[in-house]
Image: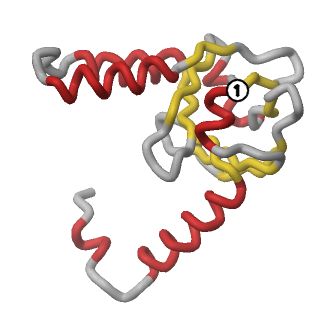
């Protein structure tokens, strides 16, 4: 399970230190792909990736948008490993997609982690914090 917020840096070789709390879940391998919000990246364990892949592949291939999404999403994915120091490489195309500079944030989102540029994460989180702490019925709309 991936939980928490971790501030890291990305080196000039595109490597990041994976939070120690995430490493046990990632021993079998890492899949990094494009994310959906604000050009973040998704980081999955192989098992987590397989579950998502199965859901996507269960949608009808006869639908044009399914094929289009599958090409876009799966073509961005990269299988990576973790070195003995707990680092993994982020491919250059994904670094560019997410606008990653030196400072990044890894965010645990239960079944996956997300990799954000620090600037985008700060902006996103401030907006979400306002949205979810205002006195409105946002939480009433969520079905727990």
Q: Measured along the vertical axis of the image, is residue 144 above or below residue 80?
A: below
Q: Measured along the vertical axis of the image, is residue 21 above or below residue 108?
A: above
Residue shown at 58% from the left, 73% from the top? 126
Q: Quadrant of the C terminus?
A: bottom left
The tally of labels here is: 1
**Residue 98 or residue 143, whichever sits in front:** 98
Colour mode of the rendering: secondary structure
Residue 77: x and y in percent read 52, 20
Q: Is residue 92 left or right of residue 75?
A: right
Residue 58, by quadrant, is top left
Residue shown at 66% from the left, 15% from the top? 80
SS at mark 1? helix
Is residue 2 visible in this depiction of the protein? no
Q: Measured along the vertical axis of the image, is residue 128 above or below residue 100?
A: below
Q: Measured along the vertical axis of the image, is residue 22 above or below residue 59?
A: below
Q: Quadrant of the N terminus?
A: top right
Q: Is residue 116 left or right of residue 15?
A: left
Residue 142, by quadrant, is bottom left
**Residue 105 or residue 75, whichever sits in front:** 75
Residue 5: x and y in percent read 67, 52
Q: Residues within 10 Å of mark 1 (few under 14, many from 20)?
A: few
The residue that label 1 is drawn on is 92
**Residue 70 or residue 18, whichever sits in front:** 70
**Residue 34 or residue 143, whichever sits in front:** 34
Residue 13, by quadrant, is top right
Residue 28: x and y in percent read 62, 11
Residue shown at 82% from the left, 15% from the top? 83
Residue shown at 20% from the left, 29% from the top? 65
Is residue 15 visible in this depiction of the protein? yes
Q: Is residue 117 left or right of residue 114?
A: right
């Amino acid at each position: 399970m991936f939980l928490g917020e971790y501030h890291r840096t990305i080196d000039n070789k595109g490597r990041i230190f994976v939070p120690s709390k995430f490493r046990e879940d990632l021993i079998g391998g890492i899949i990094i792909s494009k994310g959906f919000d604000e050009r973040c990246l998704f980081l999955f364990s192989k098992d987590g990736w397989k579950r998502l892949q199965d859901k996507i592949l269960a949608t009808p291939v006869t639908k044009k948008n399914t094929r289009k999404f599958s090409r876009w999403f799966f073509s961005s994915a990269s299988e990576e490993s973790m070195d003995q120091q707990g680092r993994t490489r982020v491919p250059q195309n994904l670094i560019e997609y997410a606008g990653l500079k030196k400072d990044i944030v890894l965010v645990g989102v239960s079944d996956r982690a997300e990799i954000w540029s620090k600037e985008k994460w700060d902006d996103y989180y401030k907006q979400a914090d306002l949205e979810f702490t205002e006195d409105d019925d946002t939480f009433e709309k969520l079905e727990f």
